[in-house]
Image (tube, rainbow, N blue to C red):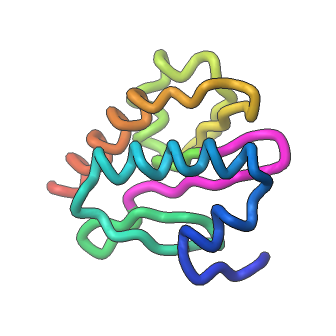
Amino acid sequence: MKAYKDIDTYIKAQPEHVQVLLRQMRLAIQKAAPGAEEAIRYGIPTFRFRDKNLVHFGGFKDHVSFFPGAAGVAVFEKELVPYKLSKGTIQFPLDAKIPLSLITKIVKFRLGQSST
């Protein structure tokens, strides 16, 4: 696993078409969680809130992934039907539009979880 010093470095290391998608996701997360800190955790971009990981995202060969944790996937499962899911991961194909409003809703849900 390659080590990245920050999210900018991570994004710049991705293919150009993936960079566009990652920048869109990053901006949506920043707007939904303006108090969250940016970091690299587990080798991928991470937003942290109150010293805990809030969400992660990353670029891969055939998709970009958003990692809101198991509850972040389970609560929005009906809205996520078009995408490949696993317990805490959502995969978005590289040739599809990223559902930024849904990412925003999931991030706000995760913030609510972090506030309790």
Using residue 95 as the reference point, say whether residue 79 is left or right of it: left
- Location of residue 81 (image quadrant): top right
- Figure disc tally: 0
- Vertical position of residue 60 compared to residue 103: above or below: below
Rendered location of residue 114, percent (x, y): 24, 57
Q: Main secondary structure of the magenta part?
A: strand
**Residue that appears at 74% across and 43% down:** 17
Residue at 35 percent across and 37 percent down: it is: 104
Quarter of image, res 7? bottom right
Q: Which residues are magenta?
A: 54-65
Figure quadrant of residue 52:
bottom left
Residue 32: x and y, percent?
29, 45
In this picture, residue 61 sits left or right of residue 12: right
Q: Closest to the observer: 12 or 59?
A: 12
> Extreme right residue here?
61
The quarter of the picture where the N terminus appears is bottom right
Q: Residue at x 30, y 75 (%)?
A: 51
In magenta segment, residue 112: no
